[in-house]
Image (cartoon, coloured by chain):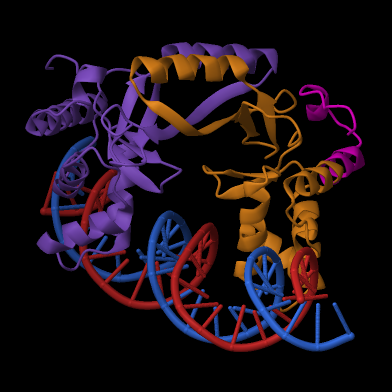
Chain colours: A orange, B purple, C red, D blue
DNA sequence: GTATTAATGTAATATTATAACATTTCATTT
DNA sequence: AAATGAAATGTTATAATATTACATTAATAC
């Protein structure tokens, strides 16, 4: 596995090819570890998602995918997305109904997604402290936490 | 304005009528303060939402509202929801595409929504510490935070 | 009372997501 | 390599969520 990615660095202008390669390598390894199949469709959808750091909608993906497979249907995309999300390779941004590639799928992560409403880039950054605080709160409420949606909209360093 | 509501108490079995009354009173006051109009439709939609602590979908609301106004259309509901959200009286739960009444609209609040996946109740609880942690993180990333989606699914004290 | 703005009515449609069932592909066993 | 069973994909249809555009009515300001 290649080295991990630095949260701050990736939000600067960067050689994006590396992100894509990293994501695909991680995907191959994670799927083989889990004994699940990264099929051609799934891999291609992941590539399309990782083409940029902007969240992409399912139907946008469909349009792109159709360029190569004109007979593709929505369910093709949603099935691939379900698989990729279950594998932790892709996350859904609920507040956008759109999807981003996970840059660090190989690490178990506690992250927040920072979404720039100007440039539309969305980055996952580590938020262990936030999670700790949330877990403490849950405990005090006797609430058993299972699945967190944590999305912060705003303006990124470049756009503010 | 009546006394504030205790986070923990509201999640126990309680006399729900109080919640509803509190929400409607707060709504009247907030709207009059802001100089906006809590029309009959808007008030009724808020009442319907506050009927329970379960998040309710726009089309479920429409079905209920149609019992009284059979000619109502989706946009009737979405307009009311937009108004109520802008006034801070209702929140959308993005991970459910559904809506809950805000129990403490009169207080400026930094809250997380705890959603029980068993009983479906959703409660907003104060999460100032979580926000502090998030703001510190934002600052370190030079990210200017504007709008947070913070929804924690799990099991509530009664259902765990 | 008239003008202006806000709210609502009405119709149509856009966007997002899933269900149901048939067929094909892949991996395993024989 | 053929038979089997499970997983993936193909195909059609439809469900669920949300918005646009324009007409009409109601409230507020002058």
Residue A10 within the segment the image draws in magenta:
yes
Q: Residue at x 45, y 42 (%)?
A: B94
Whether residue A147 is visible:
yes
Image location of residue B132, percent across then percent down: 51, 11
Vertically, is B132 above or below B13?
Answer: above
Q: Is residue A156 left or right of residue B2?
A: right
Image location of residue C16, percent across then percent down: 53, 57
Vertically, is A49 above or below B145?
Answer: below
Q: Residue at x 78, y 44 (%)?
A: A33
Q: Residue at x 19, y 19 (%)?
A: B9
Q: Quadrant of the N terminus of chain A?
A: top right
Image location of residue A156, percent across then percent down: 68, 27
Give the quarter of the image for residue B151: top left
Q: Is residue D22 left or right of residue A4?
A: left
Whether residue A59 is visible:
no
Residue B114 within the segment the image draws in magenta:
no
Give the quarter of the image for residue A100: top right
Vertically, is A113 above or below D17?
Answer: above
Q: Which residues are magenta?
A: A1-24
Q: Quadrant of the C terminus of chain A?
A: top right
Give the quarter of the image for residue C11: bottom left
Image location of residue A151, percent across then percent down: 55, 32
In depth, the one of B45 and A111 nearer the eye is A111
């Amino acid at each position: 596995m290649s080295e991990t990615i630095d949260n701050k660095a990736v939000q600067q202008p960067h050689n994006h090819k590396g992100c894509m390669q990293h994501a695909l390598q991680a995907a191959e390894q994670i799927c083989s570890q889990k004994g699940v199949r990264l099929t051609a469709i799934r891999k291609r959808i992941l590539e399309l998602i990782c083409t940029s750091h902007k969240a992409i909608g399912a139907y946008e993906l469909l349009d792109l995918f159709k360029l190569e497979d004109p007979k593709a249907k929505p369910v093709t995309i949603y099935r691939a997305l379900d698989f990729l999300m279950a594998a932790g390779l892709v996350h859904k941004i609920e507040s956008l109904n759109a999807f981003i590639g996970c840059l660090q799928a190989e690490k178990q992560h506690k992250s927040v997604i920072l979404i720039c409403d100007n440039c539309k880039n969305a980055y996952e950054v580590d938020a262990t402290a936030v999670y700790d605080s949330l877990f403490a709160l849950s405990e005090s409420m006797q609430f058993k936490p299972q699945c967190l949606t944590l999305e912060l909209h705003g303006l990124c360093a470049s756009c503010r």
